[in-house]
Image (cartoon, rainbow, N blue to C red):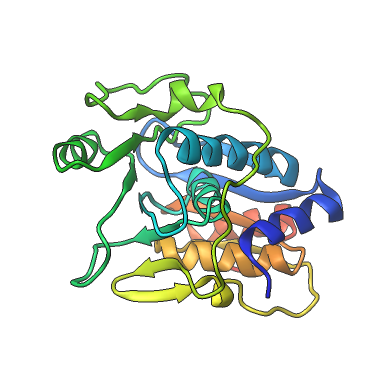
Amino acid sequence: MTRPADVLQQMLRSDSAKPRITTYDDTDGPTRGERIELSARVLSNWVSKAANALQDELDVAPGSVVRLDLPPHWRTAYWALATWSVGGTVGVGTPAPGDAPDDVLVTTEPEAARAAGDAGTRAVLVTLAALARAASVPVPAGAMDEARELSTHGDQFDPWEEPDDDDIALVRGGERTAYADLVAPQEDSAERRHLTTTDTADFLSACLALWAADGSVVLSRGEAPADVLAERSRVEGATGP
């Protein structure tokens, strides 16, 4: 059985400098035009910082639910890997009846962070812009300003606890996936795939599957013409979208 933490370590051993996720932003807003590329080494640093924040500051452990109210994005990737590094459950989408309550909400929306805090749920306010050093909007009381605070956490991470194979790793609309089933078996093919999905769970599943096969991801966010996407795939040496 391969776990997400194993996938990250495999990428570091294979080629720590190889691009593992490249994001193009075609959305309307301040991040439009960004192209961000993370190697396994850089991705691992982000994962360690977020995992330390979850474990040390937000008390996340096996059984805790961290809801990612985030779009497909390179920041979403490291928050998911960080949650799995501490043995928590990643929740995406709208909670279904019977789902365990959220322990932490990671969101780009200040109002969602404020509502979570009012309900007794810890919140992290994420700013998607790559060079942001603080949130550009007022941060609700009690919420973590990721852009300002995450950099203060360490670049190395050691979990206090490990999840069991049957612990829940991902919850999506009531559908539960255990740690033992999270990383789909893949052929030994280091594919670089171009994704345009807007579904966060599908994005995370694709990332894990490709990374487990020593591959990489190119993600295009927003709407771009077909010819632009095709040229992007050609330049990046990627298949799809």
As rendered, which of 76 and 32 lies closer to the eye? 76
* Residue 126 picture location, percent across and down: 39, 35
- Choose between 199 and 94: the one closer to the eye: 94
**Vertical side of 44 occupied by 154: above or below:** above
Q: Residue at x 58, y 75 (%)?
A: 180
Q: Is residue 146 above or below residue 170?
A: above
In the rendered structure, the answer to whether residue 42 lies left or right of residue 226 reads right
Q: Quadrant of the N terminus?
A: bottom right
171 to 66, vertically: above or below:
below
Residue 188 figure quarter: bottom right
Task: Give the side of residue 181 with respect to residue 19, left or right.
Answer: left
Q: Which residue shows up at 53% across the image and 56% down it?
A: 84
Q: Nearer the viewer, residue 159 or 237?
A: 159
Q: Residue at x 72, y 52 (%)?
A: 235
Furthest toward the right, the residue is: 14
Q: Position of residue 192 (x, y in %)?
A: 71, 62
Q: Residue 20's spot in the image, x, y percent?
A: 70, 52
Residue sitting at x 35%, y 60%:
92
* Residue 181 visible within the image: yes
In the rendered image, which quarter contains the C terminus? bottom right
Q: Is residue 192 visible?
A: no
Q: Is residue 167 left or right of residue 215?
A: left
Q: Is residue 45 left or right of residue 214?
A: left
Counting from the top left corner in percent of width and height, residue 22 is at: 63, 48
